[in-house]
Amino acid sequence: MRDKTEYMVVEFSKATMMFGIIALSFIAVGLFSFITLEHEGHWLTGMNNQIVWGLPHVFAIFLIIAASGILNIASISSVFNIKIYKSLGRLSALLAICLLTGGLIVLVLDLGRPDRLVVAMTTFNFKSIFAWNIFLYSGFMAVIALYLWMMFEARYNKFVTKVGTFAFIWRVTLTTGTGSIFAFLVAKDGYGTLMAPLFIALSLLLGTAIFYKILFWMDKGLGVSLGSEIISRFRKLLIYFIFTVFYLTILTHLTSLYVTKNHGFEIFLLFSQNIYTFLFWFCQIGIGTLLPLIILYNKKLSESSFGVLLASILVIFGSFAMLYTIIISAQAYPLDLFPGYSENSSFYDGAISSYMPSIYELMLGLGGFGISAAIYIFAIMVLDFTPRYLDDEHTLGQNNKEKSITE
């Protein structure tokens, strides 16, 4: 069926100018960080021989799984046939491309030798999940481009469901591959086999929260009024995904505790006086899980666009803290080289590693956000990605009209 939604090309305004200035500022600090690290070396970062994946990798994984999850809004419409989200399909696919691009650029620029990327792209070890991810990421871009073509070209709207289903399968596979990077590292007690489903759930939560932030900005900055139905739908999605991530987090730690050799790491993470324990209980569980649920179940706040925005921001913060805890803590905890024995050497064997991110790592990560934002603001100003109306009259009216035609 042909898409009847009215779309618009966003004109230059104060809101787009401020958005663009912030994006370009982030790109500038990211570029400065990259040039400095490329010239001086990675000794300027807080990373070391024990912790080789630092803050930039947290930013990169954050953006990559958010890209997968944000496409869920388009999937809900085209795959699961919930028409109220149909007008958001183009925007969903665009944001997926923006976030994935930003995440991959951070990943490449933090390699230390980005000029060697061509080796990784032409020499493959298919026993490594990293090699598979190269195909998953590039394929995801191609699938979304095809998806957008089907949405934009009226003649091909009839193929949106089929291509959307394929994109849905691909993005689940992509997030599985990203989670499997950590699931397959059996030498690290902090990583486990449940990382893939946990990352899938986290991607859905992150994608929903980031998408709602964009909708709120469209409402306040572009004059695209949000209807109460859209706000209510995103509130429910956030609640479902928060509970899913919370459940899988509990399940992951209970599964890890079932294995005796993992008890040391679980005590280190959950019950020790270190930064990771604080990030887990206060930032991830407290700020990123319980507080958003309190807001979303509050009658007054949950019905307002600002209340859902506040919950979304807290979810994004908690999700970032969660990824930081997962990625860094497992590297900080010492490897169990000889089970049943303790190790001690000048190479820090058996010692808990310390890590303090440097300002250059933070700037590089912010550069990824800036690139994603810049691509988005440029795209909506040259092509009609943005729906003109998101109020109840148009979203519910179109939904009811399509139902009557179908019936």
Image (spheres, helix red, strand yellow):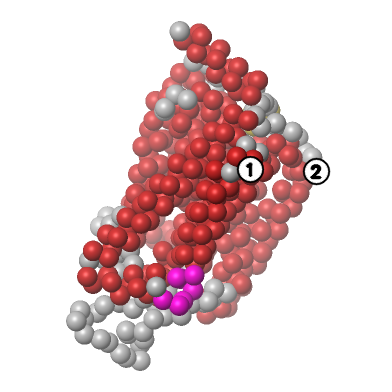
In three-dimensional space, the C-alpha distance between marks 2 and 1, rounded to whole angstroms, equals 28 Å
Q: Residue furthest left?
A: 340
> Which sits in the foreground, 28 or 307?
307
Q: Is residue 312 above or below residue 159?
A: below
Horizontal and vertical percent position of residue 108 = 49, 60
The image quadrant where one finds the C terminus is top left
- Tell me the SS state at disc 1: helix
Residue tagged 1: 301
Left or right: 100 in relation to 344: right
User: Dot 2: few (<14), some (14–19), or many (≥20) neighbours within 10 Å?
Assistant: few
Q: Residue at x 38, y 59 (%)?
A: 120
Horizontal and vertical percent position of residue 3 = 55, 19
> Which sits in the foreground, 103 or 341?
341
**For residue 255, what is the image quadrant?**
bottom left
Q: Residue at x 36, y 57 (%)?
A: 250
Instruction: Identify which amino acid the numbered label 1 is placed on.
Output: Leu
Instruction: Identify which amino acid the numbered label 2 is placed on.
Output: Lys
Q: Which mark lies nearer to you, 2 or 1?
A: 1
- Tell me the SS state at disc 2: helix
Residue 376 visible in the current orientation: no
Q: Residue at x 51, y 9 (%)?
A: 404
What span is colored magenta in the figure? Answer: 272-278
